[in-house]
Amino acid sequence: MDYSFFHIAQILGGTPLVRHDTLITRLLTDSRSLVYTDETLFFALRSSSNDGHRYVRDLYHRGVRNFVVSDFLPEFSALKEANFLTVPDTLVALQQLAAFHRNHFALPVVGITGSNGKTIVKEWLSQLLHIDYNTVRSPRSYNSQIGVPLSVWQLNEQHTLALFEAGISQKGEIERLEHIIRPTIGILTNIGQAHQENFNSLIEKCQEKLQLFTNSEWLISCKDQKLVEQCIEESGLSCHRFTWGYSESADLQIQNIEKAGKSTSIRCIHNDQAYQYTIPFIDDASVENSMHCLATWILLEEIMGGKRIVPAILTGRMNKLEPVAMRLEVKEGRNGCLVINDSYNADINSLSIALDFLRRQAKDKQMDRTLILSDILQSGEKSEILYTRIAQLVKDSNIQRFIGIGDEISQHASRFDTTTSSFYETTEEFLQSETWKKWKNEVILLKGSRKFHFEFLSEQLESVAHQTILEVNLGALVHNFNYFRSKLRPETRIVSMVKAFAYGSGAVEVARTLQQQHCNYLAVAVADEGVELRREGITIPIMVMNPEANSFNLLFEYQLEPEIYSLNLLNLFIRSASRQGITHYPIHVKIDSGMHRLGFGETDLSELLSLLSSNDHVHVQSVFSHLAGADETRFDDFTHQQAAVFSKCAEQIEQACGYPVLKHILNSAGIERFSEYQFDMVRLGIGHYGISAINSPEIENVCTLKTTVLQVRHVKAGETVGYSRRGVLTRDSVIAVLPIGYADGYDRRFGNGVGKVWINGKTAPVVGTVCMDVTMIDVTGLDVHEGDSALIFGDQLPLAEVAASIGTISYEILTNVSRRVKRVYFQE
Ligand SMILES: *Cc1c(COP(=O)(O)O)cnc(C)c1O
């Protein structure tokens, strides 16, 4: 299917403005992902938190010429060579286009939905079937209202099987996805609590999801899930059913499941035909996922295709199923390198997503880009075509150094830029070459099929492994940022507070992520923190909350904007600016509206006003104040009073200045509870990390503190554990030793049973006192072994509860995690 801009305009309706009709092959919805400008159509999408119309002009200057918008803004008139299509709703248009595209293909389309396992079932089906079919599938977990149309757009005439997943978080969404995917075979994986907040009950959510199969021929599900069964019966769906489970009435009936060591053997039967296979996993979810895959396979081959699955092929492929890595992790490497290890299947779609991630990381840091790539999973395409496309992708992504590892990719070496590329037959050969030891300050992306064992590579490239780490989920951070943004008017600006090493999570990575999210301002506590951000390539405005007089020159040099909270400080700053001949330097004036920490009081106001109106060395960029109790209802009257005092002072200052001045008073709790006081800007801090003053279920955990069991020992009743013999054992116990102590930020108050650690799916109490570098926990009966992972806080042990258990607040727990604990960042 070829589309021209004009053709698309006809399909979508709306008002076209066509200057030069061109071919369209690529759809773009996120301006940051731009690689190719040719044949690209940008959809300017609007959400509660962002607006694609803002990026049209920038994209035009970078070479994009085709746009779908919902508002033709006056500034677009200057973009003389661009084609525009104006439609009422750009997201609807994107979905319409994908639905139109889908309707041109008659291949089997597997549509997967459910609460858990969607991505894994899809990926495993692809691992099992890509030899027999030319498959197309959703990249990673592209299952949203935007992800699904982009996935379906990849469909072309060569494909013989499509695997798409659909995820929903609220009512009404699935119907739109149904029009786009039109699955011929549906899979409902299961129904659980995920994304429950917008549904009244599990039944309601299940019924909603079932609508994906309104026009399907077949529906695959697990017969043992009573709720799902009941919903399907009541749904009135007319498709054929294919079920699996222990139940006697299941079409594919499980007869035996046996777990041994690291694998599970499964025996089941369909129409008197027995199937037996082993998967290299032991968790129940993997068994369930594999059954969905087998059911789909039987349906495609035996029921719809009329040929039996060969037992040896079944055993062979099931045995080789690979875990699906869902995240892209960035780790610090040797010599200032960053290492991105993407062990997700090595195929061309996930490669282009990973390259996009690589480009963004490298661009912010202005570092060189290196890609190490193994042979790629065949996609049914001829290898000449595949590697020509990959070579092009590598070129377009401005990779400064390319390493190909494997027989096949080596055979195609001539397709790659010879000056920057080198090839090795095996991973060992590359490791032995030792060339990588000299690499400095590069971002290195590792992308390898599992059999190439790139984990040996990443071990070498990463710096020394620490046993205690703070994991920071940047995806969740962005999610929370957008949650708070959705509480505000679209034009209200956001200052992200990244003081104190971004609440312990690492200022540079967090700032970089927020800068990409178009946050307007950052705020740090002291000048040095701001200097570090500038050196790391942060370009958005930065406010310094506690500027010291001896740091003013640093402020000027690095474009950092001080908070000014007293007449004395203002006088010093003006003097310093005037000595350097600086005029109109942006400052932020702090009002004390009742917190009585820093700030100008009402009595200082007249002198402040006359100073401001009588000199031109400073420019009041904003005036602000801080709430003392925005998170507690008992202080609500006081909060209103603070807002009133602030509002009055801010107006007087603005008048004295004679120009508009940004005003702000809300912190995280304030945004959730007093959005009426958002003025022009707000200051978001702890909210980034998933702490909500109204306990919103929409928020996600960001930081996870983890450690690893160093040693396990059996200690008899009556013995004691640790210093001062405080941990007295009343029974024979098993004690695990963890490499985390108060020097890592694990507070001594957690000692003697107060603190709990999450290990092997249960909590285990701290025994005895917390030492400087080590803590002991009681794991009696928990089957804990050396090397097991233990969680200090995170999803299963919420930060707020951990803090409350020792009478403190999340802020203190987070900022106490010491700098020696390595921060590991990832994005879902
Ligand atoms: C730290 C800080 C904030 C952010 O507060 P949260 O409660 O973390 O949202 C806002 N304003 C000022 C002045 C701060 O110092």
Image (tube, grey):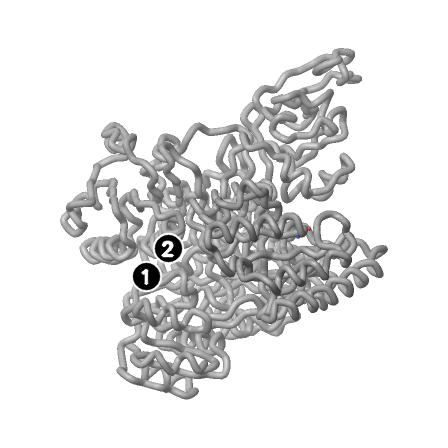
* 556 left or right, relative to 487: left
The quarter holding residue 210 reads bottom right
- Does any atom of ligand 1 lie closer than 8 Å to the CB of label 1? no
Res 233 visible: no
Quarter occupied by residue 303: bottom left
| Residue shown at the point (51%, 34%) measured from the top left | 822
Q: Which residue is mark 1?
A: 35
How crowded pointer 2 is (Cα within 10 Å; few <14, some 14-19, many 20+) is rated as some
Question: Is the residue 17 above or below the residue 293 in the image?
Answer: below
**Residue type, mark 1 in image:** Val
Q: CA distance from mark 1 to mark 2?
A: 8 Å
- The location of residue 256, given as percent across then percent down, is 55, 42
- Residue annotated with mark 2: 356
Q: Residue at x 80, y 17 (%)?
A: 730
Q: Earlier in the sequence, mark 1 or mark 2?
A: 1
Q: Under tag 2, what secondary structure?
A: helix
Describe the element under mark 1 as helix, strand or loop: loop
Crowdedness of circle 1 by 10 Å Cα count: few (<14), some, many (20+)? some
- Picture coordinates of residue 781 (x, y %)? 69, 26
- Give the quarter of the image for residue 817: top right
The residue drawn where x is 26% and y is 82% is: 20
User: Can you tell me whether the CB of the residue at mark 2 lies under 8 Å from the nearest atom of ligand 1?
Assistant: no
Work out whether residue 186 can be spotted. Answer: yes
Q: Is there CB contact under 8 Å for labels 1 and 2?
A: yes
Quadrant housing the N terminus: bottom left
- The image position of residue 460, as x and y in percent, is 36, 30
Q: Nearer the viewer, residue 250 or 726?
A: 726
Residue 480, image x, y percentages: 60, 56
Q: Is 88 positioned to the left or the right of 439 in the image?
A: right
Of the pair 742 and 243, the residue shown nearer to us? 742
Q: Nearer the viewer, residue 96 or 308?
A: 96
Amino acid, disc 2:
Asp
